[in-house]
Amino acid sequence: DVKVTQSSRYLVKRTGEKVFLECVQDMDHENMFWYRQDPGLGLRLIYFSYDVKMKEKGDIPEGYSVSREKKERFSLILESASTNQTSMYLCASTQMDRPSSGNTIYFGEGSWLTVV
Amino acid sequence: QQQVKQSPQSLIVQKGGISIINCAYENTAFDYFPWYQQFPGKGPALLIAIRPDVSEKKEGRFTISFNKSAKQFSLHIMDSQPGDSATYFCAAKIGETSGSRLTFGEGTQLTVNP
């Protein structure tokens, strides 16, 4: 059974703290993503990665960075957390592009972050 | 800029009724349109998807209707059940393969009353 695991489900951090959100997938997927989910805004892409040590900015990268040192692990980093980063963060993964193969994206269960 | 707009934001339906969620997109380069279902405390999961070369796709009680000229697509849930209560997201991307990025709608919270 495919699995994307987000180790921290609920976190409360103080403004200015450095925050790490960890994501691990066990499907040997090449592509990994971090999304942010907010009511009324849907899911917005923060960063994604097609390969180890490779990263690309999504639609809302400001205030975030990422790290992918191993294929199975993709970390989201908030260098200095702010209250407007209070949100639910979703990690996802898919296989490498294959023509006409309609790859499914698999999501983790989410990490609820509150910044006070 | 929201490239995929979804409505309504919330929807209440009686058991056995039809639930309809609508999405409109702007980018004519989009050519893959999936719908995701998310239960509380869980991540979204793929429900059904369509490409624009067909006008309708049906899987069980779930149907996507696609109108390319209007740049709209919708999800119909027939014989809605309380177990269908969830948040539904439409999405779009360029290309069916995973390399291109999904653009999501705002989400619809569906409640099916018993």
Image (cartoon, coloured by chain):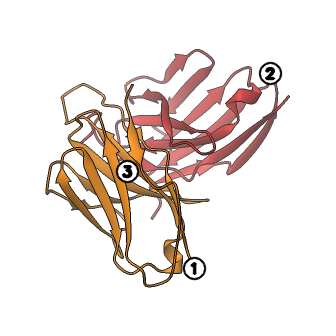
Identify residue for label 2: B16
Q: Which mark is residue B98?
A: none
Q: Position of residue A42 (x, y in %)?
A: 53, 54
Identify residue for label 1: A116
Say yes or no: labels 1 and 2 on the same chain.
no
Give the CA distance from mark 3 to mark 2: 35 Å
Which residue is pictured at 80% across the width and 21% down the height? B16
Which residue is pictured at 54% across the width and 27% down the height? B64
What's under tag 1, amino acid-wise? Val
Q: Which residue lies furthest to the top in this view?
A: B60
The image shows residue A68, relative to residue B108, as above or below, that is: below
Q: Position of residue A33 (x, y in %)?
A: 32, 51
Q: Which chain carries label 1?
A: A
Q: Which of marks 1 and 2 is in front?
A: 1
What's under tag 3, amino acid-wise? Asn
Shade representing chain B: red
Query: Quadrant where the C terminus of chain A lies?
Result: bottom right
User: Which chain: orange?
Assistant: A
Identify residue for label 3: B27
Tag 1 secondary structure:
loop
Asked if residue B28 shows in the view, the reply is: no
